[in-house]
Amino acid sequence: MIIGKAITFGANIDTDQIIGAHHLTRPNIEAMAPYAFEHYPPFKRDFTRGDIIVGADNFGCGSSREQAPAVLKERGVAAIVAQSFARIFFRNAINLGIPLIECPEAGEIKPLEQLEIDHDGLRSLTTGRKFMIVPLPPFIRAYIDSGGVVAHLRSR
Amino acid sequence: MNVIEKILAAHCCHDHVHPGMIVDIAPDLTMVNDATACLAIDIFKNQLQAEKVDDPAKVIMIMDHYTPSCSIDAADTHNTMRAFAREQQLQYVYDGIGVCHQLMMERHVRPGQLIIGADSHTCTYGALGALATGMGSTDVAVAWKSGRSWMKVPESIRINVTGAWPIGIDAKDLILKIVGDLTTGGATYKALVFSGPGIRALGVSQRMTLCNMVIEAGAKFSYIQPDEKTAAFMKELKRLDYSVFTDDADATYGKTLEYDVSSLEPQIAFPHSVDNVKAIGAAEGIAIDEFFLGACTNGRYEDLEVAAAILQGKRIAAGSRLLVTPASNAVYLRAVASGVITTLVESGAMIGTPGCSACFGGTAGILGKNERLLTTANRNFRGRVGSPDSEIYLAGPAVLAASALNGCITDPRRIL
């Protein structure tokens, strides 16, 4: 089970915003992580380890840079909830074992609402509301449960 | 099956595939560049604990985003790549001689291939009838080790293009119009198949412009059926061994969209989203600080030639700056030989080293606070080329050149 507060974003959050081009040559993900969402004040102000990112449509569009989900994982993002995800970001995040929740009603989640995610779904502890989510295919679920594709391949 | 499904079936262990099916595939080639390679190398060595790539002849490594090395971190990145290439005895390593997708098209891609690249614009190779898509560093590292990957068979959308191309209008205007209509997520997971007389009229360079930007609508693949122009392109590059796939009689498409280019106007994508597209009338007169002609979208000889024809014997506006970056050394040499580079330099242009240049914000042409860039590249995300308080407008090469003359966005049809 994951419990964290919602850090909310609008539609079409692109991977350039998550981590800018000039940071990608830093020696490793730990060195890039402080620059995640560097131009998005609510993230800088409100995010603490274990919080949940909530986006609208097409979260993670643009570049294929896996550094984008990797820096979010490094910063301690517990899960990403969005109305929909861009294809490459979705795949990269799953490969890294980040729980992704596709939720058509994500746009109705308010900033800093306390959320609870478990196998049954997504619930707001602030309002008590239960949100509809789109279940992940079992083989993708298995990647997340293993902690990513590398851990999954090793465990086989 | 349609042609997308047939190419996927030819690269997996199923005789028949259908949209939604997950298939284990053996890609013909994998490509990484200097924005994504080091992470892939780290995952390959330290997480997968792999020693040798499955087939060094299928691994292509390209330095283009931060070339020539623009910082100590970039130099270290490049040295990590060079060391890995030596250690793995990679045969195809390109260092600062062009944008990865241009080099792939000039040197490697063949119709009917299935290619994965750790760069989102890998979808460009559909211009030659290959299926190619962007993935992340982990997926590429897994493919290096195992020679395999997995894919979901996409639903295909056909885009049928008719009508004669008006003077001053080209593939960039069409793809901006299409992305504006579909929106940035409108083709997520889909294959976009371009067909019709409007496509057959285009050369390979323009087809690449079109296919390059399908990712801006979220698409997984682009595809153009190989024809006599594809064959001539392949023959000139002496790559004669390839397979051409075609739709079966019972091929199905999710939907078909129709575009008539005869009434198409120059298109501009406004900040900060590629689908924020308007016809040029809404943009004329917007003052611009920097102009960039280049990128895997529009850095080819044909694009430079369009701009040179407009700039011939004239100077760009006082107070403006124009950066031209040929997409590859081959493009550069051709533009030197024909006098196109001379024309551009005489008009006031700076010429950049072939590579990603001011498309990416990694090296050249970085924007300061409140500056505006008009660019032939493919993305206008906030802060992509520097300050988060700058603005990026996207257009084709004719709009770019006409606008550079006036220092503001200008309809090229006023000049042509």
Image (spheres, grey):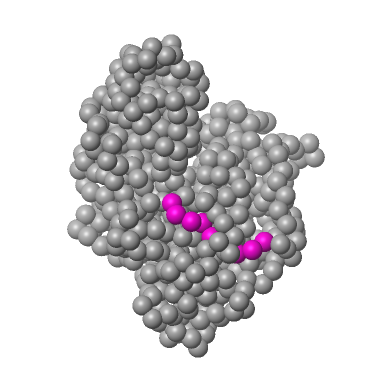
Q: In the rendered image, is residue A85 in sight?
A: no
- What secondary structure is the magenta-colored segment mainly? loop
Instruction: Name the residue at the right extreme.
Output: B249
**Rendered location of residue A68, percent (x, y):** 34, 40
**Rendered location of residue A94, percent (x, y):** 40, 29
Residue shown at the point (34%, 28%) measured from the top left? A111
* On screen, residue A80 above or below B393: above
What quarter of the picture does the N terminus of chain B occupy?
Answer: top right
Residue shown at the point (57%, 71%) measured from the top left? B411
* Front residue of this view, candidates B274 and B61: B274
Residue shown at the point (39%, 64%) measured from the top left? B372
What quarter of the picture does the C terminus of chain B occupy?
Answer: bottom right
Q: In the rendered image, is residue B368 in sight?
A: yes
* Front residue of this view, candidates B286 and B99: B286
Residue shown at the point (24%, 38%) measured from the top left? A44
* Front residue of this view, candidates B289 and B332: B289
In the image: residue B292, left or right of residue B220? left
Provide the residue span drawn in magenta.
B264-272
**Rendered location of residue B266, percent (x, y):** 60, 64
**Rendered location of residue B224, percent (x, y):** 65, 52
* On screen, residue B28 above or below B232: above
Is B31 within the magenta? no
Is B269 within the magenta? yes
